[in-house]
Image (cartoon, coloured by chain):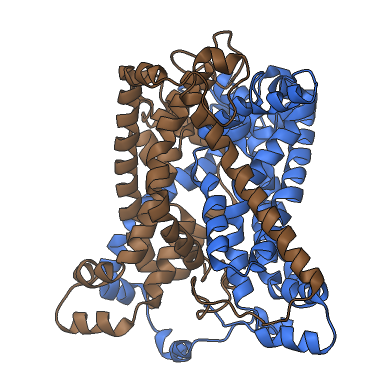
Amino acid sequence: MSTPRTLDAPPGTRDTQVRRPGRGHRPRRQRLTWRRAVRRDWRLYTLVIAPLVFFAVFRYLPMIGNVIAFRRYEPGGNLFGEEWVGLHYFQLFIHDPTFWQVFTNTLILGGLTLLFTFPAPIILALLLNEVRASGLKRFVQSISYLPHFLSIVVVAAIIMQLLSDNGVVNQGLHAVGHAPITFLQQPGWFRQIYVSSEVWQTVGWGTILYLAALTTIDGQLYEQARIDGANRWQQTWHVTLPGIRPTMMTLLILNIGTFMAVGFEKILLLYNPLTYPTADVISTYLYRVGVVSGSFSYAAAIGLFDSVIGLVLVVSANYLSRRLVGASLW
Amino acid sequence: MVNISMLRPERKAAPGAPPARVRIRPGRGYRVFQVVNALVLTGVVVVTLYPFINILAQSFSSEHAIETGRVNLIPHGLNLTTYKTVMSDSMFWRNYRNTVEYTAAATFVSMVLTTCYAYVLSKKQVKGRGVLIGIAVFTMFFNGGLIPNYVLVSQLGLRNSIWAIVLPNAINVFNLLVMKAFFESLPGELEEAAAVDGLSTYGILWRIVLPLSKAVLATMILFYAVTYWNSWFSAFLYMDRSELFPVTVYLRNIIAGATVGADNGTAGDTALQIAANIQAVTIVLTVIPILTVYPFIQRYFVSGVMLGAVKG
């Protein structure tokens, strides 16, 4: 239910939402048994059959399929494995030095991505918000959305072209008398390349929700701030930022939720054995172990560990956000 | 239940509505800021467009000019031979046609499933609605993971068929919630009147609700279509024969230097290198459809994002 939120609403009221008037009829409705519900709405229920089959087969069955992390699975054999081996595969990866390396890489790459891709759209939105000429503003917006619509394959291809031995970047280095750098072959460069291309691709699109939130800030708040003697910067700090804080928190929680899933497809396209020391992350490692080498149970154990961390992260981020700033996803 | 309502602050803040702006007499510092700001934003535009123009320049350049590092924003050794080379490759067109077919089929299936589910979820009186919403939303935060999905799709015998692309991602929960929010915003009286006139639930959905929802349907079709057009990984994972690849996998194999088939994720590892101008032309030809429709569909995308923020 979208409760209209005002800036001065006390934080406590945010989650205890206003009950719709319709809910008042509840006591009378409680009588509705399944039999009567189905008789009345059976046509509606037929509409959910196909989608429910989809969710059951392609979403929940794979969740159950994770039992192969505890069972020995043979390619082509039983979907749920052959025999119980307990925590065997978990012990295997706990003692696998490569696992800990890709785990560390995942944390670093995820952390850096969050550090740069989360604030970038906020800054761009604030800058765009200060533009008086609406034509210029719209032009910049349209251009900055563009990379969002590209396939990740195209983005990877463009990165490779720009960073090739005779690409634009090395042309620039050549112009200042620097020897060419083989960027994509050096582990020391991977993180910079990954994070900057991520910012390039997401910054414009990310401004949409912030710009929408900015337009809803009450103009009177700025007037009062000015009367109190606040300069532009102080107005931004004390009026604008608090005004878009719910949006910021929501997007932060969502970002944290995808923290462990750092751009699997992009890394798969951009990395190579030379850059594994920094580029290999959990998802790419389990892809190679499972799909390429066929150790499905081992890879499933790593994957399950990964998914559980992801779930714990989003739940705790949501909890913290609700406690600290009163904004939450659920 | 997801409640993302804080993302979308108020109804009146429709896109395009004039922002609430304070009139202020600009001081000197602020004027300086305006100039700097304009410069920064120009920089953003330049940085965004530069790679595109560079690729475009390369696609019209000779291989020799690229290898000697002379192609930046302007083509060197202007020619169209590379375009002719790429466009004469029958596999390229075959894969391009695959992309069109996969996108059309997958978008259709996604739309049917998403619409049906979203419509039921939008009906407050349906018993078990909370559970139905929960089933969908939970999958946003927890999923089976790559390996169980891979095992499942393989065991279902979907490899090397279009269904491997269409089925596993048929419902996007974000899109589902957008549609649900839209259906909820429709006035209930129309449907009640239609029911009184004797239309069944299906009739109401087909003749009343969907015609009223053209805007959101168009947006959802675009969301799905662009996603499927751009997708490559499902095809890469589940298809072994190059005549089944979509054009994104064709491009991926070109940049990975592989000539045929998938070499399983060791991009850049292969000895064979495809000339840079061929790569550039393939990139250009792959993105052209997106770039041509982009100016027209961009608005729908923005409005879709705003709708999605109404509420989960």
Q: Residue furthest top?
A: B271
- Residue B157 lies, in percent from the top left, at 36, 28
Rendering colour (chain A): blue
Q: Does residue B146 appear anywhere in the picture?
A: no
- Residue B177 lies, in percent from the top left, at 46, 63
- Chain identifier for the brown-coloured part of the image: B
Q: How many marks?
A: 0
Q: Does residue A223 appear anywhere in the picture?
A: yes
Q: Residue at x 55, y 28 (%)?
A: A157
Above-or-below relation of A208 to B8: above
Q: Residue at x 49, y 31 (%)?
A: B56
In the picture, measured across the screen, residue B131 lies left or right of residue A250, that is left
Above-or-below relation of A223 to A144: below
Front one among A80 and A93 = A93
In the picture, measured across the screen, residue B309 lies left or right of residue B109, that is right
Above-or-below relation of B176 to A65: below
Q: Residue at x 31, y 77 (%)?
A: A36
Quarter of the image with the N terminus of chain B is bottom right
Above-or-below relation of B292 to A321: above
In the picture, measured across the screen, residue A325 lies left or right of residue B142, that is right
Q: Residue at x 60, y 67 (%)?
A: A211
- Residue A202 lies, in percent from the top left, at 61, 49
- Residue B286 lies, in percent from the top left, at 42, 33
In the picture, measured across the screen, residue A324 lies left or right of residue B190, that is right
Task: Say which quarter of the image contains residue B37.
Answer: bottom right
Q: Residue furthest left?
A: B198
Front one among A80 and A302 = A302
